[in-house]
Image (cartoon, rainbow, N blue to C red):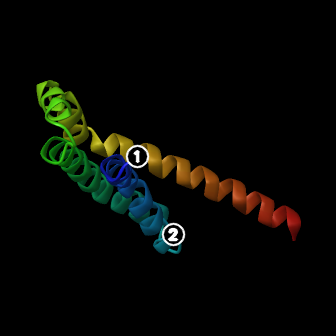
Amino acid sequence: MNFFELFQDVIRLFPLILLTLVFLYLLNVKWYWRLLAIVLLGWGVIAGSTLLFWWYSIEFAPTEEIRLNLAKKDGAPKVVGTLFGWVFALIIYGFMEFIRGVLKIFYNYLK
């Protein structure tokens, strides 16, 4: 794996890492405020990271062939990330709440 692909993976993982940290920071806040914060922040971060990913991939492609191939692709990922980033953030929030609930059950069981 070269630096180009590594940085692409970092851009892809950034929203998940940031939303997880925000979720952990907001654990003592009511669930509906936490939901609102995660969905709104997630929407912006997912949309931004999608645009950043495609900009970086095209601008810093290691070869001209890869650059042209990426530039020819349609803009569906950009549109979906921008318009429906809130749905992905909602799915991430639901998954984190599920894990939180499971960990609470195990913690209470071990007490």
As measured in the structure, the alpha-carbon distance from the residue carrying label 1 to the one carrying label 2 is 16 Å
Count the numbered circles shown: 2
Question: At 41% from the left edge and 57% from the top edge, which residue is drawn?
Answer: 35
Q: Quadrant of residue 67?
A: top left
Badge 1 is on which residue? Answer: 90
Identified at 12% across, 29% down, the residue is 68
Residue at 66 percent of width and 56 percent of height: 101
Q: Residues within 10 Å of mark 2 (few under 14, many from 20)?
A: few
Circle 1 packing at 10 Å, graded few (<14), some (14-19), many (20+), is some
Q: Secondary structure at mark 2?
A: helix
Give coordinates of residue 79: x percent, y percent: 17, 34
Left or right? Give the position of 52 relative to 33: left
Q: Is residue 19 visible?
A: yes
Residue 32 visible, this angle = no
Specify the label residue 68 is tagged with. Answer: none
Q: Quadrant of the C terminus?
A: bottom right
Q: Which residue is mark 2?
A: 24
First along the sequence among labels 1 and 2: 2
Check disc 1 and give the amino acid type. Leu
Looking at the image, residue 74 sits to the left or right of residue 25; the answer is: left
Mark 1–mark 2 contact, CB under 8 Å? no
Estimate the x, y position of residue 44 in percent, counting from the top left: 23, 54
List x then y, in percent, for residue 100: 62, 59
* Residue 56 x/y as whole percent: 19, 49
Farthest residue to the right: give it: 110
What kind of element bears circle 1?
Answer: helix
Three-letter code, disc 2: Leu
Vertical side of 62 occupied by 22: above or below: below
Q: Nearer the viewer, residue 94 or 61?
A: 61
